[in-house]
Image: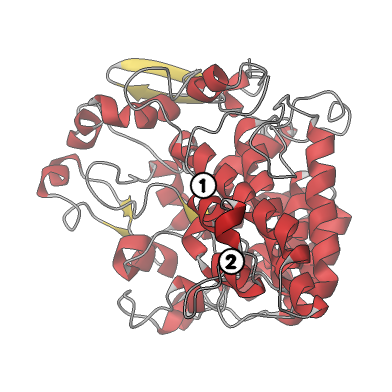
Amino acid sequence: MKFRYSFLFLAAVALGSCQKYVDIKTQGQLVPGEFGNYRLLLNNTTAYEIGPQLGDMASDDVQLVDGSTQQLALVPDGYRYWRNSYTWQPDPFPLGTNQTDNSWNAMYNTVTYSNIVIGEVPTSTGGSETDKAALIAEAKVHRADAYLMLMNTYAKPYNSATAATDLGVPMVLVQTTTQPLNRPSVQAVYDQIVTDLKQALPALPATQLFSTLPSKASAYAELARCYLYMNNYGSANTYADSALALRNTLNDLSAIATLNSNTYPIRRSDPEILLSKIAAGGISASVPNALRLSSELLSLLGTRDQRYLLFTSDPSPISANYVAAGGRFFFKDRAIGETRNIGPSVPEMMLIKAEYYARNNDVASAMLWVNNLRRKRFKTADYIALTAANGTDALKIVIDERRREFFCRMLRWWDMRRLKNEAPFQRTYTRSFGGVAYTLTPTSDRYVFSIPAYQIQLNPEIEQNP
């Protein structure tokens, strides 16, 4: 079968046209094939930033309450994917009304735009070879990030024993309108992610003015994240070191009394963010798709943690209809006025290093990295350094800290996937929705979201997940 696109690629249309028009040079207008066009395409950050959102609802960060207004709001068909992902259904997007998975579409849009830059910049007019290499490098970082997010949404967690035979996701590296979309192996896709990032590194600037533009720090951070989810903790630590050598600033939450865009940096200029990426669906703390936090997460956070005080809210600012049900909601993105970041960050690199040390039984180093982060997450009077008795204890503390730091920002679901077969973290999750009980066991196929049926209808060669 051949790839039949289910969405429009406006940039491809803008940059390519019939030959008789290509040769027309219009003063003051964009000229097809010119190098500057591709810089403008990469500056269009909305084409590259969007990632998955389904994992936040499926994770144990979120807990909807039976009979509450927010659950009733999810009954309409337009929010079917919310209740389906929350209850770990086999198909969040069955054929019919609202059958399109915007996360899937957005990430493959990123792949498409990246492929356009990678494929066309070498023959573009104007621009030095150095400048061209830099644009291609940026595009490769975006493509690698898109595939890493796709893999951790629609493919099995990486397992070195089965990665050569487990199905990855369709991999498109050359932009054409027709090509087969059979799924390569998990190993093949991860190999491509690593290749893209390593090839990109030499041509990237050390840092960029805005976090939306890839830099060396971004590529190192993506490699650290990639190797973590390949269970290669040594390489993850090495690349986390490299990222932190270029950028290691933490936002000091202890100095913030009220969270808003004046007291906390917006995403593009946030020094903690190494590459800005956002969850599909926009700001979460709004009706009806507000993320109500689980009692387990709230207990783990505690009420003196600034991440609790600043990043969560009672229901009243979201909707008066939610007040009766009570609880706390993720509120950071609404407080700042922009969608939550799910891209790699300085705190993520610090906790990758902490996990590496914990897994190697270096308890002192593991706790040093955890506590260096936590000092910036509490008021001075409330801060207490954490201690661990041994490597196993330290690892649990690191994973708990990851949950506190990244709740409702995709990584908890990714961690649930990668840790589900490790004895200290292995558990069966249960939840109730509409009076029906649902269960997620460690061996469940529901840790992998199904590929949207609509995409398979268009491209029947794509193999579906179990």
Q: Which residue is drawn at the image coordinates 78% and 39% (left, top)? A: 189
Q: Is residue 251 left or right of residue 339?
A: right
Q: Is residue 404 visible?
A: no
Quadrant location of the N terminus in the rendered image:
top right
Q: Is residue 188 left or right of residue 175?
A: right
Q: Which residue is mark 2?
A: 42
The three-letter code of the residue at mark 1 reads Phe
- Badge 1 local density, few (<14 within 10 Å), some, or many (20+)? some
| Image: 27 above or below 113 | below
Q: Are marks 2 and 1 in contact (CB under 8 Å)?
A: no
Residue 173 is marked as none
Q: Residue furthest front?
A: 20
Residue 327: % across, % down: 27, 46
Q: Earlier in the sequence, mark 2 or mark 1?
A: 1
| Image: 398 above or below 369 | above
In depth, the one of 343 and 182 nearer the eye is 182
Residue 281: % across, % down: 38, 47
The three-letter code of the residue at mark 2 reads Leu
In depth, the one of 123 and 240 nearer the eye is 123
Judged from the image, the secondary structure of the residue bearing numbered disc 2 is helix
Q: Which residue is drawn at the image coordinates 39% and 42% (left, top)? A: 294
All told, the count of numbered labels is 2
Quadrant location of the C terminus in the rendered image:
top right
| Image: 367 above or below 205 | above
Q: Mark 2 or mark 1, which is nearer to you?
A: 1
Residue 91: % across, % down: 48, 19
Q: Which residue is drawn at the image coordinates 72% and 79% (left, top)? A: 127
Judged from the image, the secondary structure of the residue bearing numbered disc 1 is loop
Q: Which residue is mark 1?
A: 9
